[in-house]
Image (cartoon, rainbow, N blue to C red):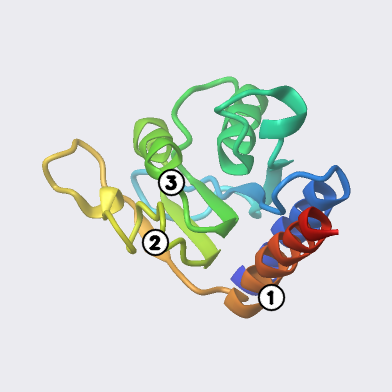
Amino acid sequence: MTDEEYMGLAIEQARKAESLDEVPIGAIVVYHPIDPATRKPLAEPRVIASACNLRESTQDPAGHAEFLAMKAAAEELGVWRLTGCTVYVTLEPCIMCAGLMHQARIDRCVFGAPDPKAGAVGTLYRINEDERLNHVFEVLAGVREEECADLLSTFFSNKRKKKKA
């Protein structure tokens, strides 16, 4: 599958969040095991976790889609190190989620829409490439950006309309 196709799965999770009246953000984690010695694939990449934003439903400040997906991925693999994993998320990760990506040692983060208010892997901060930290990871921004941004802007526009009514 391509990055665009994987982002489609994250967008499905964002729509699930929206159906729960949560901010429509979705994430998936794809595991691509590679032999560290030869750097050759050991198996086909596979989705090992998916999640949507659940902060309101669970009243959990850590209920961000990518945070929940990474926790589920660690449980699926039985390890805390998510080496060989790519996190796909519809909105640029915040400081907390980028920090978890760093701590979990992911290989890549692919996101849809940038976050001008809290983006921590390119917009406001660049946690992913801070060489003072003991792990850096690749970031690919703007995959299906317009679609991801439209989900958010439509959601908040509808919220504002309901408040005025």
Q: Position of residue 11 (x, y in %)?
A: 73, 61
For disc 2, the marked residue is 139
- Type of the residue with mark 3: Cys
Q: Which residue is at the front of the view, 73 or 149?
A: 149
Left or right of 16, for residue 74: left
For the point 35% across and 56% down, the residue is: 121
The percent position of residue 109, horizontal first and vertical second, equals 46, 55
Comparing 157 with 80, the one in front is: 157
Marks 3 and 1 close (CB-CB < 8 Å): no
Residue identifier under label 1:
147
Foreground: disc 1 or disc 2: 1
Three-letter amino acid code at the position of disc 1: Glu
Question: Is label 2 in a helix, a strand or a loop?
Answer: strand
Q: Which residue is mark 3?
A: 94
Relative to the observer, which residue lies in front, 161 or 34? 161
Q: Which of the two labelled residues, at mark 3 and mark 1, occupies the earlier sequence position? A: 3
- Which of the two discs, 1 and 2, labels the residue nearer the N terminus? 2
